[in-house]
Amino acid sequence: MSNKILSSSVYNFFLSNISFHTFISMEPKEYTQDGTVDLRGQPVLAAKTGKWKACAFLVGYEAFERMAFYGIAANLVVYLTTQLHEDTVSSVTNVNNWSGSVWITPVIGAYVADSYLGRFWTFTISSLIYVIGMLLLTMAVSVKFLKPTCANGVCNKATPFQIAFFYTSIYLIAVGAGGTKPNISTFGADQFDDFNPHEKKLKVSFFNWWMFSSFTGALFATLGLVYIQENLSWGLGYGIPTVGLMLSLVIFYIGTPIYRHKARRTGHPTSDLYRVFAGAFTNRKLILPIRPSELHEFDQQYYITTGKRRIHHSAVFRFLDKAAIKQEGKDSKPRALCTVTEVEEAKLVLGMTMIWLVTLIPSTIWAQINTLFVKQGITLDRHFGSNFQLPAASLGSFVTLSMLVFVPMYDRYFVLLMRKKTGNPRGITLLQRLGIGFVIQILAIAIASAVEVKRIHVIRVHQIQRPDEIVPMSIFYLLPQYVLLGIADVFNAIGMLEFFYDQSPEEMQSLGTTFFTSGIGVGNFLNSFLVTMVDKTTGRNGGKSWIGKNVNDSHLDYYYGFLLILSALNLVAFIGASKKYIYKREAVDIEEKCVQMESKPLDLSPLQV
């Protein structure tokens, strides 16, 4: 009897065990809901791919790339003046032009990624170009016949070939950055599924910590590499980030199996924009219908099938709604008729352009860090202790240090505190974040002007005239303006990157990110233009230039005052643009369920011309 009971128990145990494993094996695999795929175009499992474990392979590249960029940008004005013998205006102009190119070329890289190659392959090709540029730059400052000959710290004038080789290398870096910069951060953001509540919550902090890794690379550049360049070797100072960049690429490709890739659903997303504007112009004489529901839009099943995101109608830029007017009784061309979603995507681009325009002056202020602030610092007492002399460009490390300190504080404390008060997952809106940063920036440039007034006063008291004379005033007087600009960047630099990514049409998020990079680029070009025009205008008819060759006999305080006025006027314009801006409101249909991406109600007010 006991044997029968034992046999029955064993049988039941194996039966239940088999049933359990059968249930486990039959459990459906959960794929990502946003339609992301692997490198071969196959759907990816949510549990095994993406999220921070994938981003861990990306942040290393970002840190080393920023180390390479700031290792060049922070001290480029010093190299141009001491090694290539360029004057103040020429060196500042060339630094601004190169920096502007680095931040402008991402427009091309983003277009290629969104329309042709995708983010991964555009990044791959561009990163190789970047590395080649770094190798050539290291050669330009190391190989004897490629660099100017120097004796007793004084360098001879560079030959035309040496100048051409040097500028070819740094502009090759600018081309490489054009493909890496807009795609690496958006590729990182792609690792989080917007339709998974847990991953969507993780994504809120992504750009904060992404920029934290970027700041870490910048800190090492402004503290370590700048000192190495000025005191040991320019070749070693550029060689270290070159090796680091190559190592980070190896790490990046190790993570390939767990990356998520956004599947392209349209061939050329920018062509839809052209169609909207063309359609609105063609239908400009037609009368808009009373209700938005009367405009052309695909049915719900279309968005379920394609996985595209449908955008709700908004009441801004109403003239574009004419591109979606249905013309009954006429043989309308199917390609000319746009959907409400396509029209709203065009509206988003117009709205972002409006915000982009009021970020240019703040970008011009940011350009001072690697140009005129450095020229100021060179003239001051840079001794730290009895023996150590701080490189002027190293003071830029305090911009990065303040960022590194305040990013965790912002993410862990400020956001949580404001979230309780506002109910916004981000704590405050993206545009409020930008506005706070712009206000802090105005305070920074006001302090910079005041410090320059004091520097000029010390120059007059001690009757300093020569450009190489050191002003008996500590370089640490410049510290507050650097720290404040770093705090400002926690709000506006990270805020701009997140804003332009978040508000971009789904198929144009790489291009959307270039609103951020191109704004910085145009800001650099604008600063170059302002420096040149102010120098020519104030130095006309034998007058004293505000930005002369001799910084000790110039009026940088006047120039900073000029920037202060521009910044204040720009803040007023920003507030006006922010009041008119309407945030994107999406709805995405997944498996016959409508997921509302924003909680704001749909505006069904009558349309007007």
Image: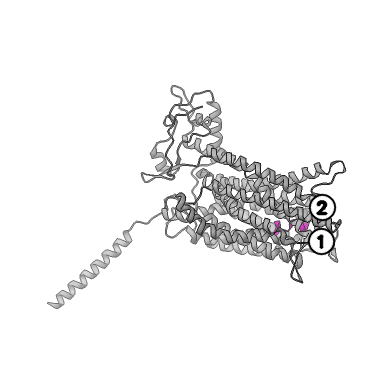
Q: Residue at x 68, y 54 (%)?
A: 173
Residue 63 lies left or right of residue 15; in this view the side is right
Residue linked to disc 1: 470
Magenta stretch: give its range: 71-79
Q: Residue furthest left?
A: 1
Q: How far across and how far down the image is residue 428, in percent?
A: 51, 49
Q: How many neighbours does mark 2 have within 10 angstroms: few (below 14), some (14-19), or many (20 or more)?
A: some
Q: How far across and how far down the image is residue 51, in percent?
A: 47, 58
Residue 74 lies left or right of residue 22; in this view the side is right
Q: How many neighbours does mark 1 have within 10 angstroms: few (below 14), some (14-19), or many (20 or more)?
A: some
Q: Which type of secondary structure does the marked residue at label 1 adopt? A: loop
Instruction: Give, as a three-letter code, the residue at label 2.
Output: Asp
Q: Residue at x 42, y 33 (%)?
A: 604
Q: Residue furthest top?
A: 329
The answer to whether residue 191 is visible is no
Residue 367 lies left or right of residue 118; in this view the side is right
Instruction: Give, as a three-letter code, the residue at label 1.
Output: Ile
Kindly report the secondary structure that dominates the magenta region of the rendered protein: helix
